[in-house]
Image (cartoon, rainbow, N blue to C red):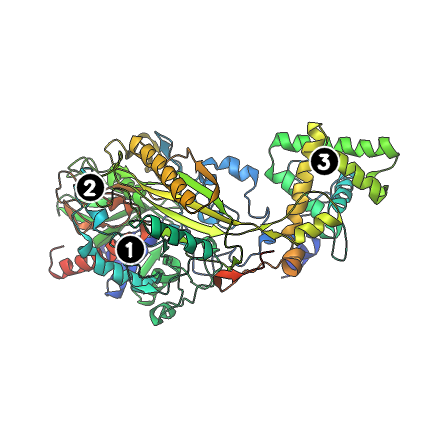
Amino acid sequence: MSNLNIDAAKANTFDVIVIGSGISGGWAAKEFTEKGFKTLVLERGRDVQHIKDYPTTNKFPYEFEHLGEPALAIKKENPIVSRCYAFKEDAMHFMVKDKEHPYVQEKPFDWIRGYQVGGKSLLWARQTQRWSDFDFEGPARDDFAVDWPIRYKDIAPWYSYVEKFAGIAGHRDGLAELPDGEFLPGFPLNAAEDYFKGVIKNKYPARHVISARCAHLSKPNQIHLDQGRAKCQNRILCQRGCPFGGYFSSNASTLPWAAKTGNLTLRPFSVVESVIYDDAKGKVTGVRVADTNTKEVTEYYARIVFINAGALNTNLILLNSKSKRFPRGLGNDSGVLGKYVAFHNYSARISAEYDGLKQYATDGRNPAGGGYIPRFRNLLKQEMNFKRGYAAGIYGSRYMERDRSGIGGSLKDNLLHGKLSPWIIGSHMMGETIPKESNFVSLSASEKDAWGVPLLNISVAYDENDALMKADYIGQMTEMFTEAGFKNITPNVSSQSPGLDIHEMGGARMGRDPKTSVLNEWNQLHTCPNVFVTDGACMTSTSTQNPSLTYMAFTARSVDYAVKAMNRREI
Amino acid sequence: MERRLVIKQVLIMAGGLALLPSCLREQGKSTILLKNLDISLDQENLMADIAETIIPRTNTPGAKQLKLHLFALKMVDECYEKADQELFVKGLTAFQDQAQDLFSKSFGKLSLHQRESMLAKLENSTSPEQSGFYKIMKEKTIDGFLNSKYVMTNLIIYELVPGRYNGYFPVKTA
């Protein structure tokens, strides 16, 4: 009997356990397996294999039941996820339905999730801008959160490392606030975007319009071809999964790469209930998993655990991992765990028309989406009545106006022979929110999910700083659009709840002091050195850049550190 | 394989979309499976005639051939609020009666001129049912047309795989 137990334990023992197969979990899997470590990747959702499990990828618009719009019954059953721009018939099978995985909204929060192998890396917007020291030094300079325990120089080589493998298209713009990376050829700005760039360069020397950097293979290198990926074909149907592997996802890139080493064990349908802390050994020994379908509980063991469950779910797992040593959740001596959650403010947009440059339109589609304006407010010093600032997307397009008036032959003729609209210029804000103790997640005391895990309470809201910043974005964009001679400038200020930006961060923040932070400079729990967190939960502040690239870099850096520490027998 | 073939044969293609036929094949009922609406075969045929008047056959197929009325019916059945669905059916029923009252003929039997003038009146109708019904009917007929397989593969080509981007594509300014 005891032998059987030992055999079972052996079969369930790995060098490393990675919880989550999304953008950061995929990287942890790749790095560890490449270095020869037997790695178990746990994913709570189903398996999604590259190409094979992209059922809508080659569908034409008319092949969707309602031209892409989810049926009303589906929308009514899913008010939260329906508010997400990507919840359409072509990708809704990659998104969590409201009823499947409830949570408690102490304050309104639209929690958008993708529970499957690859997670949200299938669905992400693929924007990959680096952070700079203007971002890492933010909390210290502007007196909020805690100081980041690292600076740009610490992560710069790891940005390069992940960029080369993932494939990032971009131009070398030479901006201190948005450092250049290892770029494949950048996508071009179009005529209207270029024109706007010129206007801004003349009138606002400290502001810049660049082509957005994105995780698309504009011109694949050998390393990308070796992954089985091919050149991006400008489909812009990425959320369906790409049959070319034209954009980076765990499914197209890191997971198959990890599988090829022979060191990967991927276990879908695995809900991690908690991480097991052994009070006698004084370290984590493994994780407790409930099978998604059968609910059978199994324990898996490893020397090291990486938690990459997605920012808020990583908090949930840590909070629910209670032991004698850690009665308030793993690594939570300080009581900081779950607090200082922040996100990005995407709640304002603006559009306008431009009457010029009618000799040009666009042909084909731009995977980068257009231009990007890095943060310029409070960049060199505090100068506004709000803290921090915003980046902005900026894009121009012309569409076919089709006259729908009248009926009969003339209507049909009008419909088939559209007229090009003037250039329509659009922009959206990406604002930094300030992490606060009062923005937090916690475990529900009374409600549990189908696997016996407490539901997550989410208590996160916008504040006055966000409102001031939003007003400034609208004001500044209006001014810049006016300078450019744009007409019909139309602000679109939304009262959407936090969450819809899908950039929730923090809760297990990095910092130097164990009294005020959960993770150290290596994304390692201060008080439990064989556990690492390299997803959004680790973020001390949010800055304005889309965060995924930074998670990838953190993960590769952290694995490198963990492996060296293991070799030194420190963990 | 055989099952697939059978399904393929019984599906009704509308615009490019495969619709399930109504299971019961009940006499006098709509030919497609509806989840919410109760539409008679006469009403379905009337919708076909209205759609054909909006988008007629010219040297390219019209609404009837593309079954745009069935596309419209499916959209109303599954994508509209109950109140809008009721408005739609009321408006459709009233319109059915109106043709009879005015011409003692069903709409489909009227001359092109008569049909067009009836729709023109609908377009300007102040009755919420009639204008509500017609607005949806016209909008969905046009959506169905522009997004139909025929149009997207023959007239306004939809490219699934463009493989290019040109931000300075020259066009005529006139």
* Residue B10 location (% of width, % of height): 70, 53
The amino acid type found where label 3 is placed reads: Glu
Quadrant housing residue B24: top right
The residues bearing labels 3 and 2 have C-alpha atoms spaced at a distance of 60 Å
Residue A167 image offset from top left, x and y in percent: 35, 63
Q: Residue furthest bottom?
A: A222
| In this picture, residue A221 sits left or right of residue B153 | left
Q: Give the answer, above or below, for where A212 lies relative to B36.
A: below
Task: Name the kind of residue labelled 1 in the image.
Answer: Met
Q: Is label 3 or label 2 in front?
A: 3
A445, A205: nearer the viewer: A205
Question: Percent position (x, y) of residue A72?
Answer: 56, 38
Whether callout 3 and callout 2 share a subunit is answered: no
Residue position for label 3 = B123
Q: Based on the displayed image, in which of its 4 quarters is residue A264 positioned?
A: bottom left
Task: Name which of mark 2 and mark 1 comes first in the sequence.
Answer: 2
Looking at the picture, does residue A128 appear above or below residue B81? below
Q: Have a look at marks 1 and 3 and say if they share a chain.
A: no
Which residue is the site of mark 2?
A139
In depth, the one of B67 and B164 nearer the eye is B164
Q: Is residue A471 visible?
A: yes
Q: Chain of mark 2?
A: A
Indicate left or right for A156 with B50 as reference: left
Callouts 2 and 1 on one subunit: yes
Label 1: element kind: helix
Q: Chain of mark 1?
A: A
Asked which secondary structure carries label 3, the reply is helix
Mark 3: few/some/many CA within 10 Å (<14, 14-19, 20+): some
Q: Which numbered mark, 1 or 3, is in the foreground of this view?
A: 3
A531 or B127, which lies in front?
B127
**Residue wearing tag 1:** A552
Residue drawn at (50%, 55%) of the image: A357
